[in-house]
Image: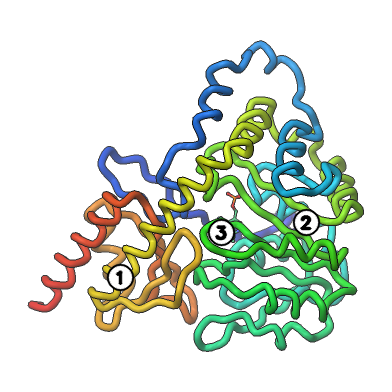
């Protein structure tokens, strides 16, 4: 068909499935197994629905101010969006506008190449080392920008701040984006580096550590100038991104630091227990500092384990991609959910011995 010739064609990102079965154990999209902070429920109950008649605050001031206070930066250094996917997409559009390729790891968040294709940004993937580490030396080549998650996804591996700084130091003529979707589970944020480098953007999300994936809140913190460029792009695209209820819910979540520490602490504790149990079952993995474990089994194929677990209504994530097609990404749920997982894995591996 002639009209199809000029259609913008993209191969879209495929999110983890969102099944909704009564007793399922859902460990496939790195959500938080606990509810959001109690203050979030209060705001929801007390929200005056008649306000929905009005457009929301385009700057999401209440949320931006709460974040600025929490992270000790100016409100003008904060940009919020509908999940960090929205913030990252806007950042690709704004900052990656060079003829030179942007750089990101070969094994990483699988949305990066989708945005690059969508916006026609040239890109080059940099292979992780054999043991899945980001090698700073490899990022010392000419480029139009750099982006990587820390901890990386789906490996869960955290790089030290020294490593991150080495990459930033070598790339001060382009924007470097550090995607910290999983930083709150034991990582050290690159936020302090903002004082030294004006070309760094740190992106985080409420979807994991703040238990609000359903609300879609993400944010970026950076130099005021970077943020003002981001706002220019946003206001040229869709000025009313975040709805008025979500702005208030997000602000309430940020204000309850005690609850935030409690739930992230619980996830970390459960993660460490799960690591021990998986090891006993013959799984191996690099050390994870995120809310998931990226594991491979010495004898059984990841895809077979994935299918078996699915038949038991336990959902984990499997990526059929080069280098990682024998790994499972297992999100950390409640203690009870992880016990069910371990029980089913034990049964499967025992049964497997006999076949
Ligand atoms: N970055 C990374 C590395 C992720 O794994 C995810 C989760 N899919 C995101 C960003 C986006 O998260 P959200 O849009 O829910 O904030």
- Name the quarter where the C terminus is drawn: bottom left
Q: Left or right: where does residue 324 sit relative to residue 96?
A: left
User: Is the C-beta of the residue carrying label 1 under 8 Å from the nearest atom of ligand 1?
Assistant: no
Instruction: Indicate the secondary structure of the residue bearing disc 3.
Output: loop
- The x, y position of residue 200, in whole percent, is 80, 64
Query: Which residue is identified by label 3?
Result: 182
User: Is the C-beta of the residue carrying label 3 under 8 Å from the nearest atom of ligand 1?
Assistant: yes
Task: Please identify the quarter of the rendering in which residue 170 is found.
Answer: bottom right
Residue appearing at x 41%, y 55% in the figure:
28
Residue appearing at x 90%, y 74% in the figure:
173
Q: Is residue 86 above or below residue 183?
A: above
User: Does the rendering let one see residue 213?
Assistant: no
Instruction: Indicate the secondary structure of the residue bearing disc 2.
Output: helix
Residue appearing at x 53%, y 38% in the figure:
214
Q: Left or right: where does residue 298 sit relative to residue 72?
A: left
Query: Which residue is identified by label 1?
Result: 276
- Circle 3 packing at 10 Å, graded few (<14), some (14-19), many (20+), is many
Classify the position of ligand 1 by quadrant: top left, top right, bottom left or bottom right.
bottom right
Query: Which residue is identified by label 2?
Result: 91
């Amino acid at each position: 068909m002639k009209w199809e010739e000029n259609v913008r064609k993209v191969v879209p990102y495929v999110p983890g499935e969102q099944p909704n079965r009564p007793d399922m154990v859902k460990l496939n999209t790195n959500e938080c197994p606990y509810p959001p902070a109690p203050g979030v429920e209060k705001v929801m109950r007390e929200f005056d629905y008649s306000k929905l008649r009005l457009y929301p605050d385009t700057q999401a001031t209440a949320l931006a101010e709460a974040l600025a206070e929490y992270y000790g930066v100016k409100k003008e250094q904060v940009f919020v969006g509908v999940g960090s996917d929205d913030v990252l997409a806007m950042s690709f559009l704004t900052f990656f506008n060079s003829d030179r390729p942007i750089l990101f790891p070969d094994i990483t968040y699988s949305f990066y190449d989708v945005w690059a294709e969508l916006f026609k940004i040239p890109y080059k993937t940099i292979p992780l080392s054999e043991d899945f580490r980001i090698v700073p030396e490899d990022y010392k080549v000419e480029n139009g920008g750099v982006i990587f998650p820390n901890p990386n996804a789906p490996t869960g591996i955290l790089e030290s701040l020294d490593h991150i700084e080495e990459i930033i130091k070598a790339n001060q003529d382009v924007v470097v984006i550090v995607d910290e979707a999983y930083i709150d589970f034991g990582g050290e944020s690159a936020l302090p580096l903002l004082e030294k480098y004006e070309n760094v953007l740190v992106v985080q999300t409420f979807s994991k550590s703040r238990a609000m994936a359903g609300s879609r809140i993400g944010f970026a913190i950076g130099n005021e100038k970077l943020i003002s460029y981001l706002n220019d792009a946003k206001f040229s695209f869709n000025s009313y991104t975040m709805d008025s209820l979500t702005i208030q819910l997000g602000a309430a979540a940020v204000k309850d630091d005690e609850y935030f520490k409690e739930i992230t602490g619980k996830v970390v504790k459960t993660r460490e227990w799960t690591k021990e149990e998986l090891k006993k079952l013959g799984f191996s993995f690099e050390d994870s500092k995120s809310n998931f474990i990226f594991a491979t089994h010495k004898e059984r194929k990841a895809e077979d384990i994935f299918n078996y677990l699915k038949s038991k209504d336990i959902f984990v994530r499997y990526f059929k991609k080069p280098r990682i097609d024998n790994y499972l990404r297992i999100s950390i749920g409640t203690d009870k959910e992880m016990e069910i997982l371990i029980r089913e894995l034990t049964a499967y591996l025992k049964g497997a011995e006999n076949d």
